[in-house]
Amino acid sequence: MILESSLPPRRPFRDRSFGLARKFLRVNWLFVFCVCLLAAVGYTALYSAAGGNPQPYANSQLWRFLTGLVMMLGIAMVDIRAIEKLSWPSYLFGVLLLLMVMKFGHMGLGAKRWMTVGGVEIQPSELMKLFLAMAIGSYFKRATPEQTGNLLLVLPAVAAILLPVGLILKEPNLGTAVITGCIGCAVMLGAGVRWWWFAIAVAILAVAAPVLYHHLHDYQKARIDTFLNPGADPLGAGYNIIQSKIALGSGGFFGQGYLHGTQNQLNFLPEKQTDFVFTIIAEEFGFLGSMAVLGLLFFIVALALYTAITCQHTYGRLVALGIGTNFFLYCFVNLSMVMGLIPVGGVPLPLISYGGSALTAVMLGFGVLMSIHVHRDVEFAAADDF
Amino acid sequence: MKRVAKTRSAFTRRALLIGTAQGVIFGAIATRLYHLQVSQHGKYAMLAEQNSISERLVAPERGLITDRFGTILAGNQQHWRALFMHALAPDPQAVLENFYKLVDLPDDEKQRIAQDLASRPGYIPVLLKDYLDWPDMAAIEVNTPNLPGVVVEVGASRVYPLGPVSAHAVGYVARPNQKEAQSDTVLSLPGMRVGRTGTEAAQDQALRGAPGFVQTETNVHGEVVREVAHDAGTPGQTVTLGLDAGLQTLAMQSLADNAGAVVMLDANTGEILAMASSPSFDPGLFDKGVPNAVWNGWMTDPKHPLHNKATAGLFAPGSTFKPTVALSAMKAGLLTADTILTCPGFFKLGDHIFWCDNHVAHGSITVTTALQVSCDVFFYQVALMTGIDRMAAMAGKLGLGVNLGADLPNVASGLVPTLAWAKSRGIHWAQGSTVVQGIGQGYTQLTPLALATMIARIASGNAVGPHITRRIGGVLQNGSDPNDWPDLDIDDRHLAIIRQGLFDVVNTPQGTAYAARLTIPNVQMAGKTGTAQVHNNSAAEKQKNFNDMTMAWENRPNALFVGFAPYDNPRYAVAVVVEHGNFGAQTAAPIAHNMMTYALTHDPAGRDAPLTLPAQSTTPALPVNST
């Protein structure tokens, strides 16, 4: 590697260092506003889920969100180059957490996904998605088209994706494993890896699917079976899908009115405050309400994409793409599940569903996204290269 | 630089492509939502309306009541009953009429059902009929189409395996009345029972538990298709009593046909080991409803089977009050172990003559001898010296005439008169009243439970209080350990003198209860007999023995005995009252003898069912064959 002689040998951030106040102004406040708006939608839905009561869901979720918001703005102030330096350490940390959750985590619904750190329950797989985007982004941050076209140089990145995906599959958490893999692929695609390699990978997966199905856990098989034929066991796993569809459909165009959704208020859906929270909005605010929320979700995805495109450095572009993709996948999987389009899996609707783990992970990612936006035109010194 | 720009435009292209794909997917979701929410709204709105997964509450299983070793005293038995989930019936009245055609119900039940229907929310079903028999069940099952909302389910009824033996201690349950059901929705659930007496009433909250729910799917006709979810709720906690079923049974057997009560306490903790009231009744009858004939029988029985004589029966203590009198005099410094008083067979106060028992002259005697032979004249004099208020104060200290705080309902405090009490009642207190107070006659009225507490306190020197609940949900209750109780605050030397006197009563040939002495080697019982007059004898009767068997049953005196054992290390205290049993020594002391013998040979005090099984002793390894 050739160093320009005019540069001092170690000088990490050499240009465009600006004051905290300026950084603060450079935050994409439209994005922050949209995120807050989405949290407000969440508060409204959770208030309704508790039968018109801020307890037990809405208020505690609000506090979590506000904590997350402060954390997000705090991270936005951190120089993206400092964050980039943490990419691989946090990746390793994430893998370590996944290994630890495997050994020490507690079981919930037949899967070891959770562990308690300092009294806070965390789901390492949620964090891993962000860390993976950062790590792959860091790997490709200086890659030329020739390099991304070289299979030998791409394979380490593939390995870095497959390791956490495998660990999450082992938990077992099929949904999150697929999402994690997709995020890795999105970042690689953004980096310029060849298209048709993805096509080949997808083809291989399609062929291998029956074999993989064979190795799935019984409850995962049951979910897929249920999805394929929900009527077969209407009171078991299929019950949720049927009730969820009834909730959506009975909402109509204008909805049944806030706090007046029969499906919601009469508790036909178990756990409606978590994964099925969208049904509350759809039932009580109708097609109009669900379109508004859908639009807001897409706008947030678009803003993330905007940050990615306007960013001057490859690392920021790739990570922003990964974070945007993560948010999109949350929404896609959750909404499709609620509408009975894909098998049920424990994926919440970000910022709306009740629960702390996914919210924290999403806000952490948005913090990094905002840091990318604030530091969109910094230059990565050659000396920072690995 | 060019290369960078190229990479960047490639990225932008791809990012926009990904963005477009995401937009398309969002579009697809929106289309799907439009399809579900707008195009198919009619279909789903109808489904929502018909959504017939309905929830109803179910009664939790009532907690068990066991004796200290786990013998079940109150349990639950399953039976079938018909419930009506009226929210599911399009026309509840028509359903009821169909039901009445199939199952015969008395008019008052029909009235109750109509009342329940009007007052209960949809998630609380109405009980149509308990204890269904096979013909009823078959009729209901066959006619399900005509009976939307009617379900047959398993219910639990309360059973009492020991029946009358533990009836008063355990109590009984009954259906909540209309008022209770309205005050607490849970109580309006079919199958819920409320404790009415005994432990069932005292520990009702612990025994009740929390209701569960059943979610059922019903079709458009209101017929239950299947159960979706079932949560049995939280069953009530097991209440472990201090009772020993063996002792309790023995107490009832010993009382036999007599009217009376036996209370045995752990002398060091006040835990009730046996509490029998005779005659008794079958508490299981209340769960289903008591037949009129049985009820009328109870009401007209002169021995009052429903009355818990152990806690609420008020009896003149007779001579069993004498230790209290002696202790109060000792405390006042008016009586010592060496004080000698003379008994010429009668005591003259003014013009009135108070006779000693059977007009016998005991001569010059000390307090221990006076207790041993139960000399009345000695205690007439002591009572007069001491005065009524000081005797009452000592009685209160020993648990007589005060609220004992027992964990049972309907515990009478009894009465030990004071001057203030007499004044408040407008009674002119004559000295003669103080004199007869010395032998536990007059206004004094005490329960067997209080008498047992008194003797337990004298025996242990601890201010123990009677209580029956040992554990709730396995948790040992306060008061089960001797250290839970404060010191009695009576001079130990005084107690020693009294205990000596009570020892002599049972273990010397002159003692009034010598016949009831224990036959177990090296263990002695101490106690006091009592024979309390219940009837103002006529002049003619006074010429005879006032406790003659020729008197009408209801005029005969009550027989009493209080005692504790072992004398040198008290563990058990017992009080026996046999109504109209003549001499205390004759009918009450032998019961105490039986109870003590059983208690000392089985020694239940301080023990209960082992919470864990003892570790299996490992079998010794076989010797290795060394050939």
Image (cartoon, coloured by chain):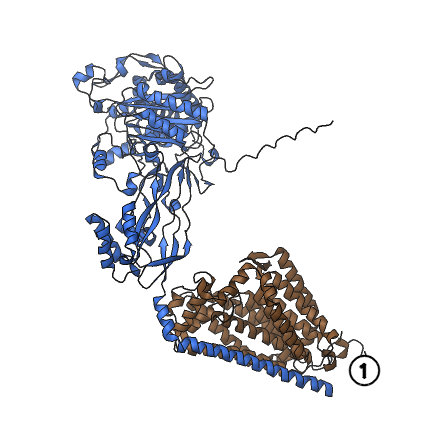
**What residue is at 58 percent from the left and 79 percent from the top?**
A304
How many C-alpha atoms fall within 10 Å of the one at disc 1: few (<14), some, or many (≥20)? few
Q: Is residue B386 left or right of residue A273?
A: left
Residue placed most toward the observer, B246 or B587: B246
**What residue is at 70 percent from the left and 72 percent from the top?**
A157
Q: Is residue B271 visible?
A: yes
Q: Which tint is chain A?
A: brown
| B377 relative to B209, above or below | above
Q: Which residue is mark 1?
A: A4
Residue placed most toward the observer, B380 or B76: B76
Which quadrant does the C terminus of chain B fall into? Answer: top right
Give the chain ID for the blue colour. B
Image location of residue B443, percent across then percent down: 26, 29
Q: Identify the subunit bearing mark 1.
A: A
Image location of residue B545, percent across then percent down: 23, 15
- Residue type highlighted by circle 1: Glu
Dividing the picture into quarters, in which one does residue A78 lie? bottom right
| B14 relative to B301, above or below | below
**What residue is at 43 percent from the left and 61 percent from the top?**
A235
Q: Is residue A11 visible?
A: no
Which quadrant does the N terminus of chain B fall into? Answer: bottom right
Secondary element under disc 1, as helix, strand or loop, is: loop
Q: Is residue A97 left or right of residue B112?
A: right
| A386 relative to B361, above or below | below
Image location of residue B498, percent across then percent down: 40, 22
